Image (cartoon, helix red, strand yellow):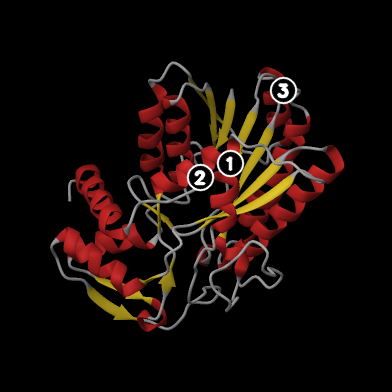
Amino acid sequence: MILVTGAAGFIGSQVAKALLARGDAVLGLDNLNDYYDVALKQARLAALMDKPSFQFRKLDISDRDAMLALAGEFPAISGIVHLAAQPGVRYSLINPYAYIQANVMGHLVMLEMARALPALRHFVYASSSSVYGANTKTPFSVGDPVEHPNSLYAATKRADELIGHTYAHLYGIPATGLRFFTVYGPWGRPDMAPMLFARAISAGEPIKVFNRGEMWRDFTYIDDIVDGVLRALDRPATGSPPHKLYNLGNHRSEKLTDFIAALEQALQKKAVMQLEPMQPGDVPATYADIETSRLELGFSPTTTMSVGIPKFVDWYKRFYGA
């Protein structure tokens, strides 16, 4: 059995779907908080609930007693894919406490749960490209210094990596952190640029384009990310300590205005762009060096923006009736 936290989330729901498709039993966890539209989270879950090998628990990962009780209820859990977190760089400026509670305390509780699982082979968890902060050397490599985060969100994800390393050292828990780069696609989060832009363009409303359009992102399609997660899960970390970090990105840094142009083409409607200055906590560019991921995981993303954006827009139109 594989435990997936954040199972009602964007990446978590698609990882759970892929695990079920290949024959794994999945236990999904999510607290279904209202950071964004709960109806979208419930719709993601609904696509999983009819699968006989899927079970769901509505729980908060920072609840120590509940998570340790769950370990006692499901001692056969052999893998954990820990994706539950409080996301978003900008919201961390508004509600910093939510990030410490979910991303630091929640991560610690999950590792304590891992210690209590006798059959556990691997603990895989979500980190973020945000840990690279304002690094100017590109592409970003897992060996680059990451000690100067630009946001509290990034700081909590770096803390997760350090705590994961420590638990691997102290208790021998094989742990792998995955630094995701700007994931997009069907079922995406409504607080992220692809969904915000698609909604505004469809409605003829202006979209905010930060740093006056001088922004580059390593946009990575959800199916490629899911493939990378499963590859990591199937290869328990080794070494002393048994802890690994990998970049999961597309190895292409695309200009934001090119992404908008692709959305315009797929939606067959022009965007009204409102150029804004750089936001606090943001970075101008992300770009993943995935050579280690290729060599050690066999990770090889294949979805370009020209393929991924039309797929996203098709889903968006169907789901929202746009």
Q: Amino acid at mark 2?
A: Gly
User: Which residue, given by chain and number where applicable, does mark 3 sit on?
Assistant: 119
SS state under label 2 = helix
Q: Residue at 56% x, 62% y: name it.
A: 129
Q: Secondary structure at mark 3?
A: loop
Q: Are marks 2 and 3 in contact (CB under 8 Å)?
A: no
Instruction: Kindly report the distance in space between the C-alpha atoms of the residues bearing marks 2 and 3.
Output: 23 Å
Q: Which residue is mark 2?
A: 228
**Residue type at mark 3?**
Ala
In the rendered view, does 109 fall on the left or right side of 103? right
- Depth check: 52 or 201 in front? 52
Where's residue 137, x and y in %?
A: 58, 77
Q: Is residue 106 visible?
A: no
Whichever of labels 3 and 1 marks the residue nearer the N terminus, that label is: 3
Mark 2 crowdedness (10 Å alpha carbons): few <14, some 14-19, many ≥20: many
Amino acid on which disc 1 is placed: Ala
Q: Is tag 2's residue or tag 3's residue first in the polypeptide sequence? A: 3
Residue beneath disc 1: 232
Q: Are marks 2 and 1 in contact (CB under 8 Å)?
A: yes
How packed is label 1: few (under 14 Cα within 10 Å), some, or many (20 or more)?
many
Q: Nearer the viewer, mark 3 or mark 1?
A: 1
Q: Report, in whole angstroms, how far the alpha carbon at label 3 lies from the one at label 1.
A: 18 Å
Question: Is residue 95 placed above or below 85 in the rendered structure?
Answer: below
**SS for dot 1:** helix
Alpha-carbon distance for marks 2 and 1? 6 Å
- Position of residue 130 measured from the top left corner of the image (x, y, whole percent): 57, 64
Q: Quadrant of residue 203?
A: bottom left
Q: Is residue 125 left or right of residue 214?
A: right
Residue 318 lies, in percent from the top left, at 20, 43
